[in-house]
Amino acid sequence: MPATDAPDLLVVGPSRHGVTRYARDLAAAAEAGGFARRPMVVADGAAAARAVVGADRVHAHVTDRLFGSTPEEAAETVEQLAALTRLTITLHDLPQGSDGSAYARRAAAYGRFIDASDGVVVNSRHEAELVVEHLGLPAASVTVIPLGTTAEVPLSSDPRSPIPGRLTVLIAGYIYPGKGHLDAIEAAATVVSRLRADGTPIEGARVVAIGGPSRGHEADVERLRVQARELGVDLEVTGVLDDDEFERRLAADGIPVAAHQHLSASRSMSDWAERGRRPLVRASRYAREMDALRPGTLTMYAPSDLSDALLHAWRSPDSTRVPPRTSLRPTLSDAALAYRDWWSGLALR
């Protein structure tokens, strides 16, 4: 599919948002492959309609939180886009029961996204099952194209020796309830208590949140600080970082953890692997799918066993490293090729 026949690629949102970053990186891979033009980049959903005027076909990566201040507003934005152009979308952050009071509204909005679009991609078989379970649509109504990595094998980096006498836990990404920061704080405190009870000298525990609070969750940071102090755990919140500092933090001393309770697709897991880190990942349908897709790039733990997993990783720091020649495919280039073939099939309809 030459670039002249490919859809225009719409990238929506702030530059450090995970969905926006992935949309931008995938667009760059498609452009490098010669089957996409330079993407249209806009700050928010409100600017999206102006960007697509005159475009014959457009593809966008959609989550309700990027396309509107409410699920209903986001659905209206996507419907407006679909009225202006032939729209295909990749869905992110699909509704789940854990959404609480927002669940019904988010599910209704995502149903409207799908109804308005000419084709829909999700990034995992798990997400395809969420479409069935929470939107009442058949799995065949969406196409699965896994998230791509930036490299075929981990980037080379010098392993850091753990700081003696201290347990350090690293969690990457935005801070919000259910992301696992509190789980990590509690588990780290438990490990310190167990080691001291065994007579093992340990100075204490530190949890580093590599990122800042998601919009509207600023108060959660202070609550985490209070809970960490009560448990005797140091908490560092880096705030939003530029790309170089973010990557430096991923490679720093500590045990990488992805303790999110409701993962459905995660760029942060790819970020860890690309930096040669093997995170502890809370067991789930999605985690098992990713373990099969990229063997050797994560270590699963049962929800009640995080402290055991941290203790093992502290005693065996090599277990937190991905061997240098481990395959990280599919890459962004692989994903872009999959989109090219999918777009070509849609164009023939």
Image (cartoon, helix red, strand yellow):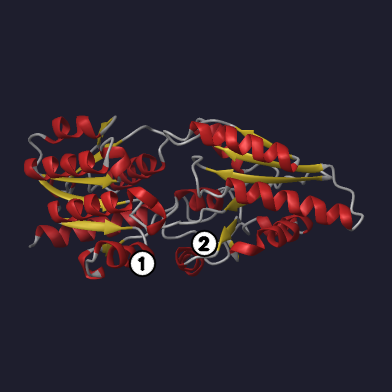
Q: Mark 2 — residue?
A: 327
Please state which of residues 316 and 6 is positioned toward the viewer in this rendering: 316
Rate crowding at label 1 as few (under 14), some (14 to 19) or many (20 or more) other CA atoms within 10 Å.
Answer: many
Say if 295 sits above or below 122 in the image.
Answer: below
Q: Quadrant of residue 144?
A: bottom left
What element does badge 1 sit on? helix
Q: Quadrant of the C terminus?
A: bottom left
Residue placed most toward the observer, 58 or 65: 65
* Residue 65 position within the rendered picture, expressed as x and y whole percent measured from the top left: 32, 40
Picture quadrant of residue 128? bottom left
Side of 274 relative to 51 (left or right): right
Given residues 237 and 50, the one toward you in this image is 237
Q: Residue furthest right?
A: 199
Q: CA distance from mark 2 to mark 1?
A: 20 Å
Indicate the secondary structure of the residue bearing disc 2: loop
Give left or right: position of 207 versus 104.
right
The answer to the question of whether label 2 and label 1 lie on touching residues, with beta carbons closer than 8 A, is: no
179 above or below 216?
below
- Where does the image place residue 49, in percent across and percent down from the top left? 15, 34
At label 2, counting other C-alpha atoms closer than 10 Å, the crowd grade (few under 14, some 14-19, many 20 or more) is some
Provide the residue designation for mark 1: 125
